Amino acid sequence: DAGVIQSPRHEVTEMGQEVTLRCKPISGHDYLFWYRQTMMRGLELLIYFNNNVPIDDSGMPEDRFSAKMPNASFSTLKIQPSEPRDSAVYFCASSFDPRGGRYGYTFGSGTRLTVV
Amino acid sequence: GDSVTQMEGPVTLSEEAFLTINCTYTATGYPSLFWYVQYPGEGLQLLLKATKADDKGSNKGFEATYRKETTSFHLEKGSVQVSDSAVYFCALSDKAGGSEKLVFGKGTKLTVNP
């Protein structure tokens, strides 16, 4: 398996534009997580899915953020409109077990978002 | 709620030095404990884990022992290398705590100089 695949790796956009981040989890993993990482706040869980259904979105900062998982092999995180404070590295992770289990979470390489 | 506290970084060491990164936790139940590592420009990777008291997780020369009496899971390595430079995250999962997911600490950045 190629691991968790995220695209794009880097995204630079202007304030007010819509941004869509994409993630392909490992085949067979039932859980998918979206995280945001910044120097100030560290690693924050935004939302996670089980079998394509959102389970906990309490970490989504505000209504400008939305996430979908239309099928088991694809998820998106959308920010509309984007703001400079959204600049961060966004990670997607997937797992068989939300508690980590034997193999833990598998993280993608992240998308570095810069909003200017 | 459940939480993980790691020592403040950054930590800077010379090659072959001994490493300790402290991690303590608060949990309702009897958690499983993890260390993850994030190399520059990459996502987090599972480094090691322990699921019950006195268990020792080990991988790539790193070790951590689950100490229930001190609620700790300190990461150690006897001789660090430049290639160990990374950010290290302690994490827990606690079914009794009602949280289905991993709880991560803030991370500790390690820099190893040649």
Image (cartoon, grey):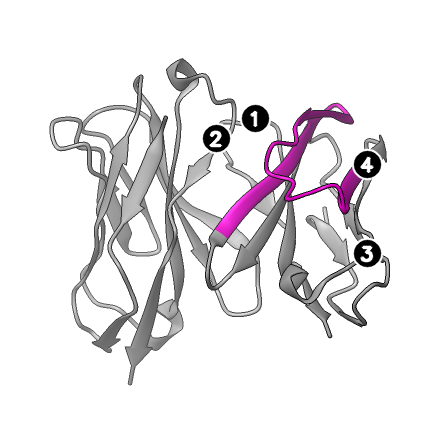
Name the residue carrying label 2.
A102
Left or right: B46 as drawn, with respect to A53: left
The verdict on residue A66 being magenta is: yes
Between label 4 and label 2, give the one nearer the viewer: 4
Asked if the residue at tag 4 contacts the one at tag 1, i.e. Cβ–Cβ closer than 8 Å, the answer is: no
Q: Are marks 4 and 2 on the same chain?
A: yes
Name the residue carrying label 3.
A81
Q: Are marks 1 and 3 on the same chain?
A: yes
Task: Please name the residue shown 75% across and 36% down the image.
Answer: A27
Asked if the residue at tag 1 contacts the one at tag 2, i.e. Cβ–Cβ closer than 8 Å, the answer is: yes
Q: What residue span does the magenta drawing correspond to?
A: A43-67
Mark 1 Cα shell of 10 Å, populated few (<14), some (14-19), many (≥20): some
Q: Which mark is residue A68?
A: 4
Secondary structure under tag 4 reads strand
Task: Residue A64 in the image: state x and y as whole percent.
Answer: 76, 47
Residue type at mark 2 is: Arg
Name the residue carrying label 1.
A97
